[in-house]
Image: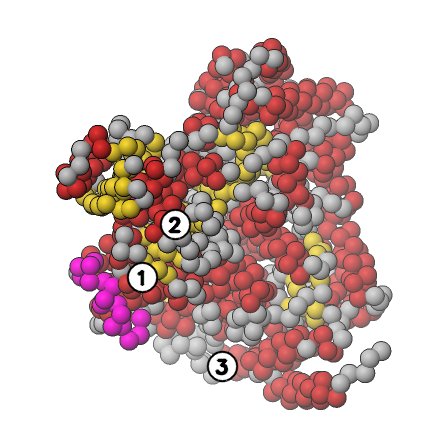
Amino acid sequence: MKEADEFHAILKDPVSYGRKMKEQGRKIVGYFCSYTPEEIIYAAGAHPFRIFASGENIHFADAHFQSYCCSLVRGALEGALAGNLDFLDGAVFPHTCDSIQRLSDIWRMNVKGPFHADIVLPVKLDTESARSYMIDVLRKFRKDLASHLRVEITDDMLKNAIGTFNTIRRSLKRLYELKAENPGIISGRDVYAIVKASMMMDRDHLTEALPAVIGELEKKKGNAELYAGKRIVLAGGICNHPDIYRIIEDAGAVVVWDDFCTGSRYFEESVKDNADPMAAIAGRYIERPVCPAKHAGIFTRGENLLKIAKEKDARGVVFLFLKFCDPHAFDYPYMKEFLDREGIPSMMLEVEDQLPSEGQLRTRFETFVDML
Amino acid sequence: MITAGIDIGSITTKAAVMAEGKIRGTKVVFTGYNAEQAGTKVYEELLAELGMEKSDVGRIVSTGYGRNSVKFMDKAMTEIICHGAGAHYLNPRARSVIDIGGQDSKAIVLDEKGKVKNFAMNDKCAAGTGRFLEVMARALEVDLDGFGTLSLRAGDPSRISSLCTVFAESEVISLISKGENRENIIAGIHESIAARIAAMANRLRIAPLVVMTGGVAKNIGVVKALERKIGMAVEVSEYAQVNGAIGAAFLAAGLK
Amino acid sequence: MNKMPEIVLFFLAKIKKLALHFKKKKKMKEIMMVYYMEAKSARISGRKVAWITSGGPVEPLIAMDVIPVYPENHGAMIGASKMGTDLCEKSESMGYSSDLCSYARSDIACATVNGGPIGGLPRPDMLICCNNICGTVLKWYEVQARYFNVPLFIFDTPFCHVGYAEEVQRYVRSQLDEYVLFLEKACGKKMDSDHLKAVGKLSLEGQRLWQAVLATTANSPAPMTAFDAFYHLALIVTLRGTPLVIDYYTQLLEKMKDRVARGIGAIPNEKYRLLWDNIPIWPRTRWLSEKLASHNACLVADTYTSAWCGTTKYIDENNFFDSMAEAYTRIYLNIGVDEMARIVLEMVDMYKVDGIVMHSNRSCKPYSLGQYDIQKIVEKERGIPCLMIEADMVDERSFSESQVSTRIDAFMEIIKERKGA
């Protein structure tokens, strides 16, 4: 759909988009992963800009990372060392896995941006002491960011920011719901581009662009053709491959939901309208479906995936993992077993920055869809 | 009705013709760089050998990586579905198929009707594929066709532990320079590929009867090593290499 | 209370007698054998067993008379006995990726088949996971918590990229109390704080002795090698906080001092001194040690075994419990790469090494990612060469003997050249 064009354009060339914003005098703070409190960055008057792998061949990063490190970490460092991220006024690293942890060190030692923040969140999210530690960590980030940008971040500014991001999250969720209810009205590629570009786009513009997309879809849904594809759910960390959606659709299936850091985990749950904004932001991270690098009970992630698959009436699940992503690889066997027990077929695909040959992918997806 | 199956793989292209549920003939040619040409060639040559005309053939299913490159087929289906169907046709008791091809290998679990219940494929690494054996044969300067029988004469198979084809090659070279006998090295190579395939197969919880298809099934050494690793008998049909094409021809008969 | 069958009592008495006998002799092999026998007979002797990560706070367990068992130590034993490849393959058929930590893979597989050199670890009553060494242990212990269906306590030590923040201290300190409550509930009895204090003292003393043992290799020739340290390490990891450790290392220290006094080196002709980085390549330690010795090179120190005595400076002898929070949080693998490089430089100076051998360990990302930067810092600051060996601590399939051999030869040529041999 044409409303998705500007999202595709950002994803195609995020660097130019970032530079353009910089030229307009914006402060830009790069960040990793969906545990970044974007609300605080936005409240400070800066623009939160999510960093992904540059997609270019690894050249500079090879001097810092071994080959058994995932393509997100290697690719992100590559972009920074190649000078593509020179428009950033700082970078934020929420602590998740062992590789991101070392990326932060190596970034701090070699990229040497003007502002470097580690948000060392607790690894367990299911105790009271972890909650109060998380609030402490967020407060510290608020203070550090304010002093670096020489601004004051008031509670009112934060509440306004929380409102903005809650609106964005609700819109993205509505987009997913519309797709799940009427799979034919928008392509998987478009949905993918809209969600991912939302993590980079100017948020004030985004709060206008998303309703436009959704308005268009709401109009279309009444006379949408019934889509006959088999309904599937994707699960994993980040997805860097719009082609996957096309290949899945060509194979006769349609993605109706996901459990991705670049998907539903980004928008699930709202920040409550509490008195203390820091406690409210922490509260959302505790309520939200977790990343496998965090702990919220030993069955939580399997149960959540099962819930998604059932609620969205999915015939099958495709696990899409980055090669060398340990947290996901550890959870895979039990999550697969959860699905097996309920008779939901699944397949697993490990990818790096480049997809396997399209021939092999087509073979896998066509066979899988035929099985459903 | 007469049906045909054409399996266009990365190294070889196979064709099978069936009539009223019976195999009438099969043929194998090298694929080369032009998949469409190879598919057309193997089909026309097989028909000529059988004294048939194109108009005699009611339906055609293509499969393999090049399945969409031929234009005259009625339907393209993945080689996994076709291998499952082929194995089922040749032996209805087959519940698992292990296919080791030139570029990739797969394990397939079937239901009692020969329909695919679950499957796994190797990642992009060459270990556990026919390519791995080719590299090793080159390092050993032994003809690949002799690999199977040579390895059966091994007294004490060498231990080749590397997962990586490049590492494993250097292991083989250092075994050669240490004077280890060829039979033992080849047996070690077979153990290594079998271990890799067994890990993939066990992940799917394969069940008997296990049949092996693909070119590597001709290598008795790999088959025996695999039997030991998975603890089940592995059957190899005389049609192992053309199993996918047979499956395609069989499925063509059932097309609506 | 059921009366124990006579045969069991007889068996227990036997173990006890054996234990006394070995404790007097203080041989590592026997001590470890008794330790594992005691752990494996815990069910009949009525004691609880906890599985705990190698860097985890073990002192409260010892004080509660819970037997700590270390899956990582078990992983090392599996690797050293060359049983890792089969177990790793087994875990892969269970669906675990071959890129995952090989300690975790072999342990997860071993639990289901009771394989490995000691027929599997005793079943745990509880799991204690401290993430100061990596995030992998969290996922690994979650797997085991599902498998054994036992309570899991996560002792969360936030990563210290730079310095040590006060909110971290507050959080970790409060978890120590939660830990004690968890143990009291699991064991159905109160913690004896005097006993815990005494255990703390023993733990600190053990760590200091271990530090002293390792420091003897600053002498030239070194009285022992890092390969010896890999072996003697087992006690400070597994039995920290018990008197056994004190006796053993006291004796070892005397022996090393005696060797130093008499000028006896660990290898016949020590000419080159090297520092080891990362977990050993367990199935290949002997090969590697012989290979280096053939070049008259001695691994005199390593960053690995010193990790079990690297934070004594944070421990308050008179307030062990409170200071544990900082000591367990600031260990070698839980700090920034630049801080690690600084420690490596200190070791380079203290042990007067000519070069560094780095094991780029596919299994261990927190240890290995960052090695290239440490290498650059060392080469720049001290001008000594570093060799990178890509391998794995347990899984032999990631090891290429001919490739490593060639690299070592080339590296030693550089070192010999530089020393003007």
**Foreground pick, A202 / A265:** A265
Kindly indicate whether the residue at mark 2 contacts the one at mark 3 (C-beta within 8 angstroms).
Answer: no
Which residue is the site of mark 2? B88
Q: Against C416, is B56 above or below?
A: above
**Residue C259 - label:** 3
Judge depth for marks 3 and 2 and give the one in front. 2
Residue at 39%, 61% (x, y): give it. B195
Which residue is the site of mark 1? B222
Is B8 covered by the magenta stretch? no
Distance from disc 3 to disc 2, alpha carbons, whole Å, reads: 72 Å
Other-residue count near label 3 (Cα within 10 Å), few / some / many at <14 / 14–19 / ≥20: some
Q: Secondary structure at mark 1?
A: helix
Q: Which residues are magenta?
A: B142-157
Q: Quadrant of residue C16?
A: bottom right
Other-residue count near label 2 (Cα within 10 Å), few / some / many at <14 / 14–19 / ≥20: many
Q: Against A106, is A253 above or below?
A: above
**Foreground pick, C203 / C33:** C33
